[in-house]
Image: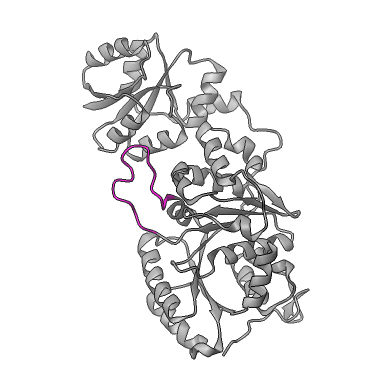
Amino acid sequence: MICVLMMASGAAWESAALARLDGQDGVVVLKRCVDVDDLLATATSGQADVAVVGLEAPGLDPSAVAHLRRYAVRPVAVVSRTDDPDVLTRAQRIDVRALVAFDDPDGLAEAVATVEDVADTRVRADALAPPAPDALEADPGHRLVVVWGPGGAPGRTTTAVTLASLLARRGRDTVLVDADPYGGGVAQQLGILDEVSGILSAARLAGSGHLGERFASTCRGVGDHLRVVTGLPRADRWIEVRGSALEQTLECALEHGDVVVDTGFSLEDEPGQDFGSRPSRNAMTITALDLADEVVVVGSADPVGLSRLARGLVELRDRTGGAPVRVVVNRMRPTLGWSEREIAGMVEGFSRVLGLHFLPDDRAAADRALVSGRALVEAGDTALLRGYGAVADATFPASAPPVVGGRRAGRRRWRRTSTT
């Protein structure tokens, strides 16, 4: 038995389609949905197999189609003409592969009962709407690194900004994405004065299917090699960015260089987050972590910060379990009375990590950079910047200067500095 959801938004073809499907053996129309929100909420129940929708229905975008597929609901779109280039392009952008003309009820019954073939609409639409000539192909050497850390401001944003700025200074094309759902601070740290939010602009373009061709418009250039997708202008606007929109944003960003993502602190799933069109507040953070090639976890060296770091590592391990984890212990200072070895033993007791780095507590350098709206790399050679340089070497090994005579060429005194 094939269970069908129908969402026609008042289109004239609905009655004929309903009558044809009702007379089809092995097919039952489970519900006629009033709009996309109703369709998505019903799909979440897991009882439907196919959704018959109007291609131009308000709110039917890539995120909605991704939601249907997440719950194994196959979309079939009813259109005016199946050979119209504009229709095929629209179908490709929102990832609907089965198209049926509204005056072909028998074709609709066949499409509902047929297993989806991926080599149909997508291929024809690609042929009709080829990529823009200046589109960049993804470099397999580009990496996606996500900076995460527990609550309490351990230095996530400073770490993300500094890593991205170091990569750019080394001549690597880099995209810095502010994906903090609680209100990003990347723009403020870099002195970017722009009323247009890059992440909100990217989410809107992803919803309309135009992000790939217009991704550059969502970025602000900082120097020759760094592009920044700025974050939310207000924390209450997190609801406008779905996880699927961020996923598309990061995929586009990888076509332009290495990607560093600044995220929020919470990994908590919200009950009922998938019922309807309302995303989870932490969807951006969780999506970024799921896609990461490597996760840099930032914790503060004080007692409260280390306690949060320990709990955060356990939570991260249980939540993701995929990408390797590198830990950065920030604001390390002799007055705490702990050695690096003691802290390393604590960290390794809670999680297996790819590497462990200690950054000295250099408030003066951090404050100068923050007040001036510049990255640490512009504040001159400091112990803190050298510590971040070691993190960048390990996280993006392709960017590290070559070793000459036992030390890094062009980088004097960039060795690990003990604070004990």
Q: Considering depth in this image, is 175 or 337 the residue closer to the camera?
A: 337
**What residue is rendered at 56% in x and 90% in y?**
420
Residue in view at x 37 percent, y 23 percent? 53
Q: Quadrant of residue 363?
A: bottom right
Residue at the spot x=78%, y=73% of the render? 410
Indicate whether 20 appears above or below 62: above
Front-most of residues 57 and 365? 365
User: Magenta stretch: residue 97 in it?
Assistant: no
Q: Position of residue 401 (x, y in %)?
A: 72, 70
Scheme of colours in the image: one colour
Give the image quarter of residue 390: bottom right
In the image, what residue occupies the spot 70% across and 64% down? 372
Q: How many marks?
A: 0
Quadrant in which the N terminus appears:
top left
| Displayed quadrant of residue 311 | bottom left
Q: Main secondary structure of the magenta part?
A: loop
Lateral position of residue 11 relative to residue 331, left or right: left
Q: Is residue 145 left or right of residue 68?
A: right
Q: Position of residue 272 (x, y in %)?
A: 29, 46
Magenta region: 267-283
Q: Where residue 233 appears, x then y in whole percent?
A: 55, 49
How far across and down, in percent of the image, does residue 395 sit?
A: 59, 66
